[in-house]
């Protein structure tokens, strides 16, 4: 079990208690994940103060991690790509015309695939606002080629944490710890995502 410290004086509601308070998944016609996320975002107030953990002191009761969800997405994935800039052109007076920034298509497609799997795992529940989380990734990379390169571990973290915004948590500032394992040159690439919620608050 993964543990960190917390004070023993505070009760620790389980994750089931939190999810039960959110309510049942909405019924009816399925809407796109992006539309649902936008609707939930409008109903939320942020920033909202959630109980923050602190560094444990000797003798404190440990904080437990509860598994919220675990999904595996088969196939090659990519890391978070840097925003691209288009429409940069110098004018005669030395100024530049308006520029447009956009997210690379591979990044957009990867985030959409992740959001769809996380949305299924959340079963229609709105994002959790009052918890901190641990994000664990296992990346199995296929051999690099001209079209697909290699990515740093933090690119994968950013891809998944952004995809989970307003879906699992309200904002990835709630991610308090993370782990990434990368296995390269595998025959069957995939991405495994595990998200844990800190059960205790630590004062």
Image: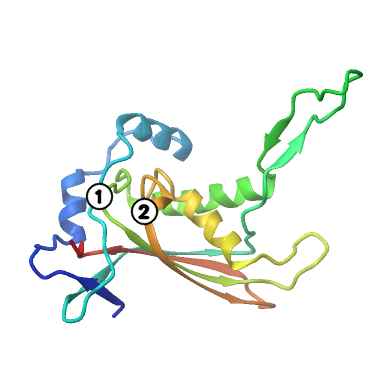
Q: State the image coordinates of residue 165 (x, y, percent, origin top left).
A: 43, 46
Residue count near mark 2 (Cα–Cα under 10 Å), binned few <14, some 14–19, many ≥20: many
Compared with 34, 143 (above or below) is: below
Compared with 127, 92 (above or below) is: above
Q: CA distance from mark 2 to mark 1?
A: 9 Å
Compared with 4, 74 (above or below) is: above
Which residue is at the front of the view, 111 or 7? 7
Q: State the image coordinates of residue 174 (x, y, percent, origin top left).
A: 36, 53
For the C terminus, the image quarter is bottom left
Name the residue tied to disc 1. 50
Side of 137 where 144 appears, left or right: right
Q: Is disc 1 placed on a helix, strand or loop?
A: loop
Pointer 2 and pointer 1: residues touching (CB < 8 Å)?
yes
Identify the residue at horizontal 10%, vertical 63% (top origin): 10
Which of the numbered marks, if any, corresponds to residue 174?
2
Residue count near mark 1 (Cα–Cα under 10 Å), binned few <14, some 14–19, many ≥20: few
**Location of residue 96 (image quadrant):** top right
Identify the residue at horizontal 20%, vertical 65% (top origin): 202
Q: State the image coordinates of residue 189 (x, y, percent, origin top left).
A: 62, 70
Which residue is at the front of the view, 33 or 27? 33
Q: State the image coordinates of residue 135 (x, y, percent, origin top left).
A: 42, 64
Q: Earlier in the sequence, mark 2 or mark 1?
A: 1
């Amino acid at each position: 079990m993964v543990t960190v410290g917390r004070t023993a004086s505070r009760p620790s509601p389980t994750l089931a208690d939190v999810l039960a308070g959110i309510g049942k998944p909405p019924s009816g016609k399925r809407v796109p994940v992006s539309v649902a996320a936008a609707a939930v975002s409008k109903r939320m107030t942020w920033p909202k103060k959630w109980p923050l953990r602190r560094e444990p002191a000797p003798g404190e009761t440990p904080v437990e991690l509860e598994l919220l969800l675990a999904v595996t997405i088969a196939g090659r994935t990519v890391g978070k790509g840097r925003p691209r800039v288009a429409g940069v052109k110098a004018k005669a007076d030395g100024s530049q015309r308006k520029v447009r920034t956009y997210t690379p298509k591979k990044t957009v497609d990867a985030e959409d695939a992740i959001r769809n799997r996380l949305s299924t795992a959340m079963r229609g529940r709105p994002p959790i606002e009052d918890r901190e989380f641990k994000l664990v990734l296992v990346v199995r990379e296929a051999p690099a080629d001209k079209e697909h390169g290699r990515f740093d571990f933090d690119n994968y973290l950013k891809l998944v944490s952004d995809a989970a915004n307003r879906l699992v948590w309200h904002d990835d500032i709630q991610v308090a710890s993370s782990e990434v394992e990368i296995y390269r040159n595998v025959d069957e690439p995939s991405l495994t995502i595990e998200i844990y919620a800190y059960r205790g608050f630590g004062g």
